[in-house]
Amino acid sequence: MHTQSSHVRRCHDFRWDDVPLLEYKAVDEAPFKDVTRQVLFQRDDMASELRYFEVAPGGHSTLERHAHVHAVIILRGRGRCLVGIEVTAIDTHDLITVPPMTWHQFRAADDAPLGFLCMVAHDRDRPQLPTADDLVQLRARPDVASFLDGAA
Ligand code: MN
């Protein structure tokens, strides 16, 4: 039995060996709060990539949409997500599918982080941010408006 392997990278407290802890995005690229990114699997000979994002308590990912799909599994903590016009409480091990061109955002609980694996296509389009008109439409729904404001 090997204890070390070039094929195995260990995890310690949601940090993986040889995986840099990155900013979620460039700060001037899009609005978000307290999110880190680790790219776990990314190869030119694989059609998909697997990343781990962690949103600190009270933080949130960018509100965005794009043609590519997300397959998400919550690995740590809990929070809420907006997918389309649905606001849903999410907990560890839940699976979330984000269909093409669907607005989405992830928010950690105030007292817990939200860590999740996110599978995406290797070749994918860039995210779009909501226009002022898009935000007016989304905010027409009171539950979506309070989600976007970070209210409970
Ligand atoms: Mn996205």
Image (tube, rainbow, N blue to C red):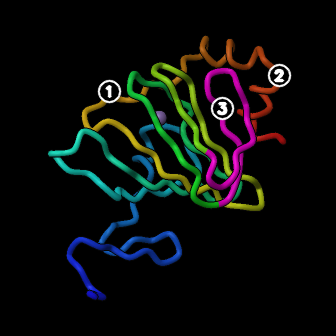
- The chief SS type of the magenta part is strand
Measuring 61% from the left and 61% from the top, which residue is drawn there?
Answer: 76
Element type where label 2 sits in the image? helix
In terms of sequence position, does the residue under pointer 1 or pointer 2 come before the other? 1
Q: Position of residue 36 (x, y in %)?
A: 48, 57
Give the label on residue 125, or none: 1
Measuring 68% from the left and 21% from the top, which residue is drawn there?
Answer: 85
Give the image quarter of residue 84: top right
Q: Position of residue 92 (x, y in %)?
A: 65, 55
In terms of sequence position, does the residue under pointer 1 or pointer 3 come before the other? 3
Give amino acid for label 1.
Asp
Q: Is mark 3 within 8 Å of ligand 1?
A: no
Crowd tier of the residue under label 2, counting other residues whose Cα lies within 10 Å: few below 14, some 14–19, many 20 or above? few
**Magenta segment includes 33:** no
The region drawn magenta spans: 77-94
Asked whether the residues under the numbered discs 1 and 3 touch, taking CB atoms below 8 Å apart as contact, a structural biologist would say no
CA–CA distance in space, label 1 to label 3: 20 Å
CA–CA distance in space, label 3 to label 2: 13 Å
52 on left or right of 120: right
- Looking at the image, the residue that sits furthest to the front is 1
Give amino acid for label 2.
Pro
Give the label on residue 142, or none: 2
CA–CA distance in space, label 1 to label 2: 30 Å
